[in-house]
């Protein structure tokens, strides 16, 4: 395989348009590019979380997050020409299995969890919120023209997994989970 990025700058996007590989120019604020950019941002936040995890020794989460980064690149690949499908229902099943395994060891929730706890849990919550934005972008794009609907399910389930991962990280690193106090006035 040759080099994918032999030249980093091309100046081809200086006019606010870009090419996804099929020589069709799209404005950089097109819904497809908004989704691709949000997936890139999500992947970057997960990468930041992985960097923090390297110092924290939370072994159960590291390989899952690494696989998620590869999966997110595959999702992006599905959204670019030649538009092939890679994400399958088996990806959803694996996310659900992981959620169930991790959640089984957590105390039941009585209220919403406020994002925070420590740098690991807070970064995981940040990844979750970026994932929710990616999901909203995917819904907008899907309304313009359908693509693999499993991507919508994948992003929905991924945000659930990131929520549970934040709880696991808080627990395994002795951080406090702050629950929302719905009666708090101040």
Image (cartoon, helix red, strand yellow):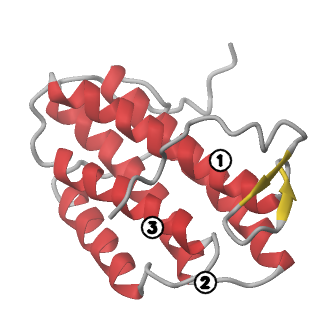
Local crowd size for mark 1, using a 10 Å CA cut-off: few (<14), some (14–19), many (≥20): some
Q: Is residue 30 above or below residue 151?
A: above
Residues at badges 3 and 2 in contact (C-beta under 8 Å)?
A: no
Percent position of residue 10, x then y: 69, 39
Q: Earlier in the sequence, mark 2 or mark 1?
A: 1
Label 1 element class = helix
Residue assigned mark 3: 74
Residue 17 visible in rendering: yes
Local crowd size for mark 3, using a 10 Å CA cut-off: few (<14), some (14–19), many (≥20): some
Q: Quadrant of residue 54?
A: top left
Residue assigned mark 2: 149
Label 3 element class = helix
| 154 horizontally vs 65: left or right | right
Q: Name the residue rendered at 45%, 59% in the picture.
A: 72
Q: Earlier in the sequence, mark 3 or mark 2?
A: 3
- Mark-to-mark CA distance, 3 and 1: 14 Å
| 129 horizontally vs 45: left or right | right
Instruction: Name the one closer to the observer, 30 or 7.
Output: 7
């Amino acid at each position: 395989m040759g080099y994918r990025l032999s030249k980093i700058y091309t100046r081809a996007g200086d006019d606010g348009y870009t090419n996804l590989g099929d020589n069709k120019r799209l404005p950089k604020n097109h819904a497809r590019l908004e989704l691709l950019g949000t997936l890139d941002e999500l992947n970057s936040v997960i990468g930041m979380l992985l960097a923090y995890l390297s110092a924290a020794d939370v072994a159960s989460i590291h390989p899952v997050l690494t696989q998620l980064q590869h999966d997110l690149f595959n999702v992006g690949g599905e959204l670019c020409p030649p538009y092939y499908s890679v994400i399958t229902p088996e990806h959803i099943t694996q996310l659900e299995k992981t959620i169930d395994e991790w959640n089984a060891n957590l105390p039941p929730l009585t209220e919403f969890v406020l994002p925070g706890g420590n740098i690991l849990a807070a970064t995981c919550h940040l990844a979750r919120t970026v994932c929710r934005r990616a999901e909203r972008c995917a819904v907008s794009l899907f309304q313009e023209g359908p693509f693999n609907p499993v991507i919508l399910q994948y992003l929905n389930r991924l945000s659930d997994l990131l929520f549970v991962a934040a709880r696991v990280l808080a627990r395994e690193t002795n951080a406090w989970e702050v629950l929302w106090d719905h009666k708090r006035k101040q």
